[in-house]
Image (cartoon, rainbow, N blue to C red):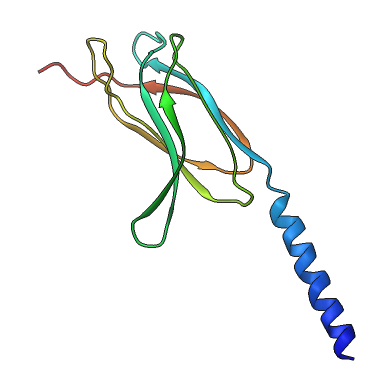
């Protein structure tokens, strides 16, 4: 009887592991544009992270947009997590832009066009 219960327990654990490992790559990609002119924005910083506990943050990817304003993060997380995409509105060009944040589902491909609003001139 103990062997049967042990076999059932191990089978249940193995199935649970298979379901968790079914989460493949998380892909977040897109382009960052000026909301008014729709012009792609190069050199904009971006990052994606998930939070845990009280104040814990684990960055899963970051970089700067390319000359066409494109960005891409690909990460194998192994499980579904609440991801936050953050795009910093500071750039080396004349205008500065508002910060953009959005919750993203992991274990999926998300393609975005991010429209950043220019900050008012001082």
Counting from the top left corner in percent of width and height, residue 14 is at: 78, 65
Is 97 displayed left or right of 26 in the figure?
left
State the quadrant of the N terminus.
bottom right
Counting from the top left corner in percent of width and height, residue 33 is at: 40, 15
Relative to 97, is 82 above or below?
Answer: below
Relative to 100, is 118 above or below?
Answer: above
Residue drawn where x is 43% and y is 9% of the image: 67
Residue drawn where x is 64% and y is 49% of the image: 78
Relative to 16, is 101 above or below?
Answer: above
Between 32 and 72, the residue placed more toward the observer is: 72
Is 22 displayed left or right of 114 in the figure?
right
Counting from the top left corner in percent of width and height, residue 13 is at: 75, 69
State the quadrant of the C terminus.
top left
Residue drawn where x is 68% and y is 42% of the image: 24
- Residue lying at the far left of the rendered structure: 122
Is 122 displayed left or right of 83 in the figure?
left
Residue drawn where x is 33% and y is 57% of the image: 55
The tally of labels here is 0
Relative to 12, is 69 above or below?
Answer: above
Using the rendered view, name the quadrant where residue 116 is placed. Answer: top left
């Amino acid at each position: 009887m103990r062997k049967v219960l042990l076999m059932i327990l191990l089978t249940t654990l193995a199935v649970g592991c298979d379901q968790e490992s079914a989460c493949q790559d998380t892909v977040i990609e897109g382009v960052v544009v000026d909301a008014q002119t729709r012009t792609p924005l190069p050199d904009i910083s971006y990052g994606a992270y998930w939070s845990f506990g009280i104040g814990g943050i684990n960055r899963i990817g970051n970089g700067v947009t390319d000359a066409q304003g494109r960005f891409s993060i690909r990460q194998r997380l192994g499980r579904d997590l609440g991801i936050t995409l953050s795009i910093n509105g500071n750039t080396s060009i004349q205008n500065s832009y508002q910060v953009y944040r959005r919750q993203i589902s992991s274990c999926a491909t998300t393609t975005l066009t991010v429209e950043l609003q220019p900050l008012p001139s001082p």
